[in-house]
Image (tube, rainbow, N blue to C red):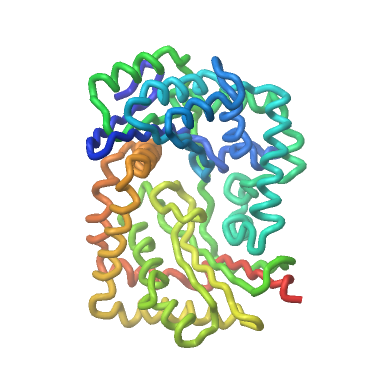
Amino acid sequence: MTLPNGLRVLLIPDRSAPVIGVAVVYDVGIRSEPEGRTGFAHLFEHLMFQGSANLEKLAHFRHVQGSGGTFNGSTHFDYTDYYEVLPANALDRALFLEADRMRGPRLTQENLRNQVDVVKEEIRVNVMNRPYGGFPWLRLPPVMFDTFPNAHDGYGSFDDLEAATVADAEEFFAKYYAAGNAVLVVAGDLDLAETTRLVEAHFSDVPARPAPERPSFAEPSLTSERYSTYVDPLAPLPAVAAAWRVPDPIADLAAYLPYVVLAEVLTDGDAARLVERLVLTDRSVTSVGGYVSFMAEPFAVRDPTAFLLQAHLPPGGKPAGVLQAIDEECQRIASDGLMVGELARTQARMGANLLRETDSVLGRALQMAVLEQQRGAPELLGELPSRIGAVTEDAVIKAAASLTPSSRATVELVAGGAR
């Protein structure tokens, strides 16, 4: 249902356990940040936990944890989510908390400065002071893309974070945190009529504001190889990551899905092509992984995005040799096809993983919220295993053939920590 203020609501009953999951997804992410304010979407996620229209700072934490629940939020390229998992009898409380901060978080100078410091410390811990920090999700986009929305550092520079003002936060909230720009999902042990009543009671009086017009982030595909090298002073071993553009995950799902399958064919499990060759036979890498989208969330991202392969190498390892082996394996699929049972085995494993990921009420709520937000099709969650199972060998062959050096963006990490 859609409330008069534009908030879209999905209710998903599941009486298997006396638990409810509440998720609110806003159509704002890293790509929404204005120039000069890198990291702002993530910073604002932090501000949404610093008190709200009727609650003081940390009250949200106390109310959820005092009810026996857990909560969190996260920022992605194309959305930001907030969620709670609680005993079913705490549904009223969870809806009040989310509606209250949808009306307005406490955007004060004190809260802003405090959370800028928190985010800066997070960057120190997760990127600056950690081996392989930000590799490759922060390093590849500026090599592959040219426009600010797609290429900039989503964690943010310290200078941009320090320059953020309360006025910036108020403008960001007014533009992107409108009810009409959000999806609310409640999943779990719920009564539809009572839950509908509670949702309307808590959210109907949230002021209506139109969702902002979403710009196109489209960029031309690469026509020549791009290669970048940097030294990680803490990394003990070298690494390399390569990325190729893929079809639009929303407008052309049928052409996109073979790349999702191909990533698994190449890297998932000891029998996977690149694992068997690079790790077990050649021993030219210590690990190799493949996935689609920079945050490895293939069904929660808009265009443009990428197919990625990354590998960590032993001391003295040669990235050029690894890239050559990747090219050879992709060409081998393109020319010889897949082995007997290779595709079916991969599809069965992928289908099982999808079902496992959405077995919990929270997993189901978050995935369906994003599918509604980006596609208006939450039912796709139940269709994905069969859609993946319908991907043909010819489609995977075509995807492998497109992974050429001339359309590749590569980042080589030089191990400075080994000195």
Question: 416 or 329: which is nearer to us?
Answer: 416
Say above or below: 394 vs 148.
below
- Taking the spot 50% from the left edge, 28% from the top edge, the residue there is 212
At x 47%, y 14%, the residue is: 207
> Which residue corresponds to the image point at 70% horizontal and 45% vertical from the top-left?
121
Q: Is residue 291 left or right of residue 112?
A: left
In this figure, what is the number of numbered marks?
0
State the image coordinates of residue 378 (x, y, percent, origin top left).
Answer: 30, 39
Residue most toward the bottom? 282
Q: Is residue 144 visible in this depiction of the protein?
A: no
Q: Position of residue 406 (x, y in %)?
A: 53, 71
Q: How far across and down, in percent of the image, does residue 283 sit?
A: 52, 85
Q: Quadrant of the C terminus?
A: bottom right
Q: Is 368 rendered above or below residue 138?
A: above
The answer to whether one can see residue 23 in this image is: yes
Question: 203 above or below 161?
Answer: above
Camera-nearest residue between 88 and 122: 88
Q: In the figure, is residue 6 to the left or right of 350? A: right
User: Residue 154's x, y, as percent?
Assistant: 61, 46
Give residue 241's quadrant in the image: bottom right
Q: Nearer the viewer, residue 275 or 326?
A: 275
Q: Quadrant of the N terminus?
A: top left
